[in-house]
Structures are given as C-alpha cells and as structure tokens.
Image (spheres, rainbow, N blue to C red):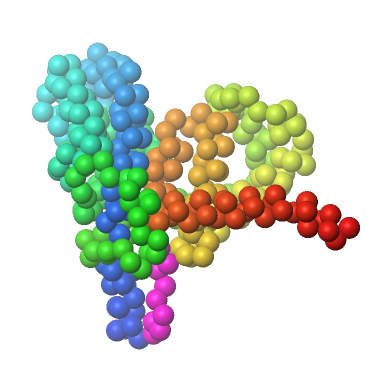
Amino acid sequence: MNASGSGTSLSPRGLGRAWNRFFFESGVPATCDRFRVAYSLVLIAYVVGLGADLELFHSTTGLLTYEASRSVIDPDTSAWLLALAPNSDPWLWTCYASLLGCSVALLSGIRPRTMAVLVFALLVSFQHRNILLLDGEDCLFRMFALLLCFMPLSRGFRVFGSLRSSESGEAVAVTSRAWALRLVQVQMCLVYFVSGIHKLRGSDWLQGHALYYISRLDDLFGLFPLPGFLLESPDIGRLLSWSLVPFEILLPFALWTERTRLVALVAALSFHASLAYSMNLFFFHYVMAAGLVAFTRPGDGIRLLRGLRGTTARLLSLPKILCRRA
C-alpha cells in the first residue's frame, strides 16, 4: 500500500505518472473482496438495528412525519425509493426487507456490484427520510456502499484464501479498476487525521482533561466495566489524552508506509476494539474496522503470524539471555 514511487519527478509529466500509479496501478482485487465481506457483515448488523425502531423513526405514524422530514432537509433532496409511497407502512417494510436482502446478497457475493448499487440507493432513501438521525457512521456506510459500486468484485464469499495467498505483494495481480479502493483508504486517513487536528483546536485535549470528561458521560461511556485506576487517576487520564492526539495524526502516515503498515493496522484495530468495549458509539468503530480492511494485502496473515511467533520466541528466550549475562 506504499503510494510512493521511486524516481518520481516534480515535472507535470512525473506528477501525472505518480497520480496514475497511485489511483490506477496499485489496487489489489482480492483486497476489494475482503473489504466487501467486512463491510457487509457490519452492514447487516446495522440494518437489523435499523429495523428494531423502523416505524418509530421512519413511518408516518412515528416521531417524524414525511412532511415534517421534508422541512428539515434541502428541498431538492428526495427520499428516493421511500418517496414513491411516503405514507405507506407496507412499502416502508418492503424497502427495509429489500435493504436487508441486498446486504446479505452483497455478503454472499451474488452479483455484488449490482447489490452495492441497490444498497446505496436504499441507504440514501432511509437516511434522507429522517436526516435528524444521521451521524458519522451513517455517512461512512453510505460512502462505502457507493465506492463498492465501482470496485472489481468477485462472486462468492472470498476472504480467507486471499489472506493466506501470495507471500509477496509484488506477485499479486493489480487492476486499473481498483481506484475506488484508494478512495476508501483516503477517506479512512482523513477521518483519523482531521479528528486529531480538530482535538488540537480546543484546550481539553491539550491540558489532558478530555478523557476525564468523556468518562463521566453516562450515556456514552461505561458500556462494559473498566479498572477503576484508569478512570480515577489524573496522571493516567492525562497520558491517555495526550497520546491519543499524536496517534490519530500519525496513524495515516504509518498506514501508507509499507514497513509500518501491519503494525499500524494492529494498533488501529486494537484502538477501535478498546473504544467499542468502553464506549457506546453504536456501529462507528465497527465500520471503521471494516474500512481498515482496505489497507490489507494478500499474505498479511502469514506475515503477521510469523511476526508474532518471532516476538514470542524472543520474549521466551529473554530470561535465558539475562541469566547468562548475570
């Protein structure tokens, strides 16, 4: 996933070659399939959660009528498919069942690009029906569905074999149609980088008080029990607050560098897993984890296992080395 090329000049022709190499000569089709599978798994859970309160938030007898929903959105914006019968609950459930079915079909690899188009259209329809519910995770679900429409996707559930195949990334096939995968990677890096830069604009993160305040938000924090010293110690709170800002700013650069890519992926997934354990942010961390799959390459599973084995072996041999030196 290293985007840099050797010998790239700063001339217009050299910059043009670098642009083409970045967007059109570096996509791995197997990575597109892994991203599709990871995204679809999270999408199905997201759609199931949507159905739990479907009539409450999207029907004409719920909290927001169709006419009221049009008054809080751009008048040129339509609810797409739901607008065909905006006051019909049977049509609402038909669209919902279609969204769930298309999500399962996308996971299974049944005409995946067609399913991605339908998923995108249905997601936009539901999100435009009640825009007051939207947050960052909804935008990512919609954006990833759109980019999947332009990816070279294989049929079937293809993920584990591509993780094990190809020891070297240079040996795998690339395709000029995988430019949409690059846009997923760019979007992921922007989320991290802008989040880190935005934290620098306030004083709470710079002074190290931010996580203390966040841990007191009962509706967001405390999803599962945590050790008391993490929440009560001012020094640990400041250390975690201060470390999070450079982590988010530097993570995109580590993801783009081949030498640090695997370490950055493990760190990012561990970061989202810890926040998903401690905070109630719905599906945000899960869809971010799916987006990180766009940075994987064939053979990563083998390289990661070898790295873990080597690290474990060095740790086990450390007592023997210390005894010899003593």
The verdict on residue 7 being magenta is: yes
Q: Identify which residue is drawn at 19% across, 20% down.
A: 93
Total labels: the figure holds 0
For the view shown, which residue lies furthest in the right direction?
326
In this image, 84 relative to 278: left or right? Answer: left
Residue, far top: 61
- 303 displayed left or right of 116: right
| Residue 6 drawn above or below residue 307 | below
Quick one: 47 or 264, which is closer to the camera? 264
Quadrant in the rendering for residue 246: bottom right
Rendering coords of residue 292 (x, y %)? 42, 49
Residue at 72 percent of width and 44 percent of height: 238
Whether residue 12 is situated above or below residue 259 in the rendered picture: below
**Among the 4 quarters of the image, the one containing residue 51:** top left
Q: From the top left corner, tell me how far across and down residue 316 is, in percent.
A: 70, 49
Q: Nearer the viewer, residue 166 or 199?
A: 166
Q: Which residues are magenta?
A: 1-10
User: Residue 283, can we see it?
Assistant: yes
- Quadrant housing the N terminus: bottom left
At 72% from the left and 53% from the top, the residue drawn is 317
Q: Position of 48 compared to 149: left or right?
A: right
**On screen, 96 above or below 312?**
above
Q: Quadrant of the C terminus?
A: bottom right
